[in-house]
Every structure is written in C-alpha cells, then in structure tokens.
C-alpha cells in the first residue's frame, strides 16, 4: 500500500489532537497516525494514576475543563475520556493502530513515512510523539540474573508484582507515587533517591501549581534555565492520589519507606548506595525556597495576597548504604525518560536528543514538532500549554503550504 497525504500528524495524544483541531480551523486537510489508541501515553500509566496538575489544566483549545472540581485531580481513566471526547468533538481524522517506523526525505514529496500499513508520501509532517519516549536507566551495574526488573511503564498495580520487598530506583514524581502505593499495599519498600524538587500540594486550599501559574512560572522560556540540561530535571514531588496530597522525602520517611541514596553499583546480590540522601533532600529544599521567594515577591504585583508558605522541617536519617538483593522481590526503575527520535532519518536533534525548532518549526522545511518539553516555554508539553503551541505550529504549516502552492 502506498498513498500521498499532504499533511500528516504523528501521534494522537494531547499535542496531536490540538494540532489537528487547529489545522481543521484553518481548513488544512490532514491525517493523524497513532501507533495504538488515542491518548495511549495516558493509557500506559498505572491503574491508580491520577492527574498530578490540577483539573483546570485539562484545557485544550476550545474545550476547557468544565467539571465541578478545578483544583482536584481526576483519575487516569477520566483523562483518557477527556481526550477521547476532544477527538470526537472536533472529529479529528485519526487512524489508530498505525506504527510509523521511519521518516526520511523523499523525491517528489518532501518526506516518505514507512508505516505498518505501507508507505506514505507527505509534504508536511508534524511530530507529536510526546516529550520523552524512551525509559532511562543509569549505568549502575548489572542486577543478578533472574531478578525481576521492570520500568515504570510496565507497572500496573501491587497485586501484579512478584511477592517480596520492592526496590524502587528513582525518586521523581513516579518513584515517590509508586513507593507510597506499594507501602500502603503492605509491601516493604526501599526507595533509591536522587535530586528532585518538591512543593506542598496546596497553599491556603489552592493548588501550588495554580499559584505558580498565576505568576507566569509556566511561561518561562527555555533560556530561563541555568543550562539546557535543566530540561531533564525531575518534576516536583507531589501526587494527585486521593484528591491530591503532599508527597516527598519527608512524608515517605514518616510513612515507613526506607530511603536510600543513589545506587552506586551491584556486586553479586549486594547493592551499594551512596550516602548522599541528605544532599538530595537539601537540593529539593533549596528549590522550594527559591519558589517560596518567587511567590512572595510576584503574587502581590499581580493582585494576590501571599498564602502561608511553609518551611520544611529539619531532615534527619540513618544512612543505609547496602541492601541484600536476596530480600528483594522486584526492582522498579523510575529514573525518567529521554527523547528518542532515532526513527527520523534527518538531522533534527541537538546534543541532548531534543528536536531543534523555532516555535515548533524544524530547520528541515515541512517538518514540525509539538508537545515537546520546553519547546517554547515551560508548559509547552502540558495540556494547558500545548494549545498555544499547536496554534503556532498549525499557522506555520498553513503558511508553508501557501508558499509551496504559489
């Protein structure tokens, strides 16, 4: 099978659906190719997953959140329903179950896509495959043969795991959330911790994300980061579980989770850990102190009273630097993801693997990106930020088609 489609969107998550809607508004015919189902990245989350940002952030173009609890946190399935309804409302031309194996330059059209249903020639391609596609495991040694090891994407619920204690490696949002869920399910949990910021879930009954949005925190551009590597910093530790609550090193320690430093290496069935837990906690405290100062200075200038801004309690711990892996039933890696665009056979990425764009437009004519972390600003990949990027990208696609047709 081979066909020609003028404009192809790859990916039917929030970015792909938003771009589709914006192209439709501009009268640009197109097709959205999705490897599995609409909102697949959300379907891949574990069973109890809840939206970490408040509900009002479900704000795609033309369909803002209209529910009764804007500061709450809906379940995974409600997020999926929102995106499915969005697709139906705007009648997005999605073809589900189509894998795109490669994208390359072509003669006669700008691009050729090799897909599971055959080759497609396209003049414009918008890549909306998410911010991060590939699970990342740090090089820390080889775990014993036969030990059950999974990445966060493979986790569904505590009952599906092998019996025994659990070692979670990675302490960003996902690592903390899984550690809490597993401990509450009756498992003994060890959490290998790295550097991650944290925020209180709410300040004066308003979500901290809402407060940060009010001061334009999520509109900060990429060059506001100390270095490009800041794009890989973990998201703040917190959770939407149970309607949303605090979740960070201190709450996990009080709960009974055994906190460890970074995994240093593995020798047989002995895993060793760096005694740097205190430094990791201090790093998170320093980030919260910066945000506290930012809120205190910026909220009054925007007409808001400053809420009570808590200061973290002193953190004390007894270092645990070795764990006998004979006692561990399963290891779960939650050490984040990295971008993966190796299937694009064109020079599109920087040294860190992120696509090079000018507001979503690649230096390769006819190629565009949307839904990339910090593509324009901090909220570029989030549901309350991707819409503006989608409109910019759609306008660029329409302009590109106009220049080609003249």
Image (cartoon, helix red, strand yellow):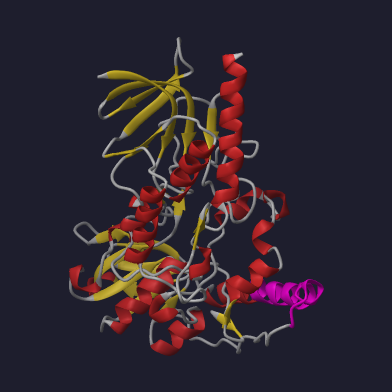
Out of 160 and 129, give the one closest to the viewer.
129
Q: Position of residue 13 (x, y in %)?
A: 41, 48
Residue 254 shown left or right of residue 331 in the figure: right
Residue 72 shown left or right of residue 79 in the figure: right
Quadrant hosting residue 180: bottom left
- Seen from this angle, which residue lies furthest right? 301
Q: Is residue 193 above or below residue 307?
A: above
Q: Is residue 299 magenta?
A: yes
Residue 100 shown left or right of residue 310 in the figure: left
- Taking the spot 39% from the left edge, 59% from the top edge, the residue there is 82
- Seen from this angle, which residue lies furthest top? 108
Out of 195 and 56, give the one closest to the viewer.
56
Q: Position of residue 383 (x, y in %)?
A: 51, 57
- Taking the spot 42% from the left edge, 80% from the top edge, the residue there is 243
Quadrant hosting residue 279: bottom right
Q: Position of residue 251 (x, y in %)?
A: 47, 85
Q: Is residue 372 magenta?
A: no
- Is any part of residue 28 visible from this angle? yes
Q: Position of residue 311 (x, y in %)?
A: 65, 86
Q: Quadrant of the C terminus?
A: top right
| Principal secondary structure, stretch drawn in magenta | helix
Q: Is residue 384 above or below residue 66?
A: above
The magenta span reads: 286-305
Q: Quadrant of the N terminus?
A: top left
- Is any part of residue 360 visible from this angle? no
- Taking the spot 53% from the left edge, 46% from the top edge, the residue there is 372
């Amino acid at each position: 099978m081979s066909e020609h489609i003028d404009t192809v969107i790859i990916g039917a998550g929030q970015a792909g659906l938003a771009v589709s809607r914006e192209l439709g508004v501009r009268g640009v015919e197109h097709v959205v190719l999705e490897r599995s189902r609409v909102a697949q990245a959300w379907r891949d989350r574990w069973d109890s997953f809840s939206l970490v940002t408040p509900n009002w952030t479900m704000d795609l173009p033309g369909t803002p959140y209209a529910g009764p609890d804007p500061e709450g946190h809906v379940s995974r399935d409600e997020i999926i329903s929102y995106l499915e309804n969005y697709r139906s409302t705007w009648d997005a031309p999605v073809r589900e179950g189509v894998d795109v194996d490669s994208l390359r330059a072509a003669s006669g059209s700008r691009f050729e896509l090799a897909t599971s249903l055959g080759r497609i020639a396209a003049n414009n391609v918008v890549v909306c495959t998410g911010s991060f596609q590939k699970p990342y495991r740090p090089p820390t040694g080889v775990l014993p043969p036969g030990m059950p090891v999974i990445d966060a994407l493979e986790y569904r619920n505590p009952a599906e795991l092998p019996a025994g204690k659990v070692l979670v490696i990675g302490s960003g949002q996902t690592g903390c959330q899984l550690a809490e869920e597993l401990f509450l399910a009756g498992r003994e949990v060890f959490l290998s911790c790295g550097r991650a910021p944290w925020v209180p879930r709410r300040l004066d009954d308003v979500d901290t994300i809402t407060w940060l949005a009010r001061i334009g925190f999520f509109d900060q551009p990429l060059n506001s980061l100390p270095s490009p590597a800041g794009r890989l910093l973990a998201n703040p530790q917190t959770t939407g579980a149970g309607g949303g609550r605090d979740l960070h090193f201190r709450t996990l320690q009080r709960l009974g989770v055994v906190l460890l430093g970074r995994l240093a290496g593995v020798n047989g069935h002995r895993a060793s850990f760096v005694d740097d837990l205190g430094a990791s906690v201090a790093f998170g405290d320093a980030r919260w102190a910066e945000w506290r100062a930012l809120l205190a200075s910026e909220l009054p200038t925007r007409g808001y009273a400053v809420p009570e801004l808590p200061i973290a309690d002193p953190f004390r711990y007894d270092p645990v630097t070795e764990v006998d892996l004979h006692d561990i039933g399963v290891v779960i890696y939650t050490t984040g993801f990295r971008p993966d665009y190796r299937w694009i056979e064109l020079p599109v990425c920087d040294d860190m693997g992120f696509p090079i764009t000018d507001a979503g437009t690649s230096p390769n004519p006819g190629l565009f990106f949307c839904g990339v972390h910090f593509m324009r600003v901090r909220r570029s990949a989030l549901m309350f930020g991707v819409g503006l990027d989608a409109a910019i990208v759609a306008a660029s696609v329409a302009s590109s088609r106009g220049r080609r047709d003249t």
